[in-house]
Amino acid sequence: MLPSPSSSLRVSSLLFSIALSLIGAGYGGDPYVFYQWEVAYASASPLGVKQQVIAINGQFPGPILSATTNWNVVVNILNKLDEPFLVTWNGLQHRKNSWQDGVLGTNCPIPSGWNWTYEFQVKDQIGSFFYIPSINFQKAAGGYGGIIVNNRNVIPLPFGLPDGDITILISDWYIKDFKELRKIIEDGNDLGVPDGVVINGLGPFRYNESIVPDGITYATLTVDPGKTYRFRVHNVGFSTSLNFRIQNHNLLLVETEGSYTVQQNYTNMDIHVGQSYSFLVTMDQNAASDYYIVASARFVNSTTRDRLTGVALLHYSSSQGPASGPLPDGPDEGDTYFSINQARSIRWNVSAGAARPNPQGSFRYGEITVTDVYVLVNTPAEVINGQMRNTLNGISYIAPSTPLKLAQQFNIPGVYKLDFPNRMMNRPAKVDTSIINGTYKGFMEIIFQNNDTMIQSYHMDGYAFFVVGMDYGTWTENSRGTYNKWDGVARSTIQVYPGAWTAILVYLDNVGIWNLRAENLETWYRGQELYISVSNPEDSSNKTELPLPNDSIFCGALSSLQEQQSHNFRFSEASSVAKMSKILVMWLLFAWFGVCTSWLL
């Protein structure tokens, strides 16, 4: 006998409720989002010359990774390149989980033909970030894309909901293959001036026939009149600071690298290598024509700037004609203080409701006692042991064959030393694997002193740090009197002008081994990076750090632990809890469907 309609509905509702609860409970209480990425070479012509690029799922730039605060992200990467590959997530903090950071200090590279699954939580984060290849100079061929971490619905935005969301990736670009560029660096030579600037992987609109050759495909962004869009702009380039602007449109700055900012209008913004900004842009101009979107090189002469100017089109849906007139003016290159003053004007919105860097709930970071001070000095590249290298405090980092994190996990001696100096030492520069021994829950002050003639930018994985000061000259202890001790913006990448210093404060509460690197690709590849080890000596139950992933790839001294074909063209699933949840959910949904069908029949 068939069950009554009322009892069937009660049973089906119960089963459906159980399924939904298992989705939450089985996934650690927070949703999962899954991505399957195939990394392979593709042919493209960013500057009108056909060349080999690195694409993801056939896309150059790669697809946008989108999640919401506290969601779990699973990205299965199949490496179809002819060499190992790793991707790192610029600005994502990977709380308790440096295993997923995707740099040589934490991960063995994914061999050609293998796959590996990143699994991490975007814990207590919001904002605009991006991913890039982290090894073998592969970033020079692409393999990058945007990351969006949305607010949870219960946390309101500190501005009206935009009508649309647009990601823009700007970069200086070379037409040489990345392997050829890599060889130039390894031979001790400089790359020279880039060949151009690309916007979303495409070259400049032909705004001037004497400067831009014919036949280049350019980016067009279509918008509707009267609407407001959120533009997320990322400099994913090699070494060039780029000034971003949109003809006749204001840029209302609202967020940078996960922190909401005091909202201010800018006509243009200097975006340095590795940095990300969010602007609200209202389409309030004459809708009968298009407008120029410009990204042009900073701190170069006019001839070089003409070469290094990327131009896309902002296309109103009702437009009747192309953009016209000269490009909108950028900053006066003779004004050496424009950029540093603009950087100082960017302040943290301390009243916005959103995920914040630790200490949670404490905005008076200027009153917290500093436990460690490191003055990291950058000097021009020099020859060390017959190779051109870049250093911090006279040390050029060399990656060991065994990742630092694995060496720490398995107590392998001799892989690294916890003796990175906190000041420039009076000794010859050297190549070494020396890292900083950070104090868990300590408050570290880091001063970047740039004694080179080129601007640099530095990125720190695992954290958002407070930018408290920057100025020209040499930092001294008296410089602390100029620090912003209230609303310095919290971010993960900061510029340091030539002959100048930048100071940051960071609370070391995220256990792991974390990379601090130059974002200038040439400088990074020649050794200007280091790692900070943060351990909790009182954590015997691993509450402050997640365990070694089950699908870890082993290399170096641990190569014997690797099952040779264990990652070869195999989808590496999420955690066993997630797998079991999916099975149970599917079973319950089938049961629910069966009950409902039997009642209907």
Image: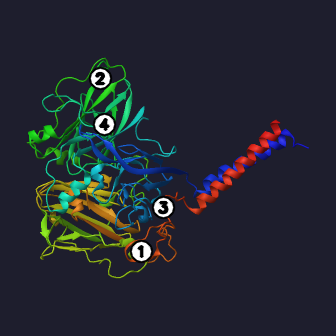
Nearest the eye: 465 or 551: 551
Q: Is 58 situated left or right of 182 in this image?
A: right
Mark 3 vs mark 1, foreground winner is 3
In percent of width and height, residue 555 lies at: 39, 71
Mark 2 vs mark 4, foreground winner is 2
Name the residue tied to disc 2.
Answer: 285
Sequence-wise, the earlier of marks 2 and 4 is: 4
Which residue lies at the image location 54% right of the left edge and 59% below the top edge?
Answer: 574
In percent of width and height, residue 563 lies at: 49, 70
Nearest the eye: 41 or 203: 41
Name the residue tied to disc 3.
Answer: 568
Helix, strand or loop under label 4: strand
Nearest the eye: 414 or 7: 414
Mark 2 vs mark 3, foreground winner is 3
Q: Where is the C terminus found, in terms of image quarters?
A: top right
Helix, strand or loop under label 3: loop
Measure the alpha-carbon separation of dots 3 and 1: 16 Å
Helix, strand or loop under label 1: helix
Q: Disc 4 marks which amino acid?
A: Leu
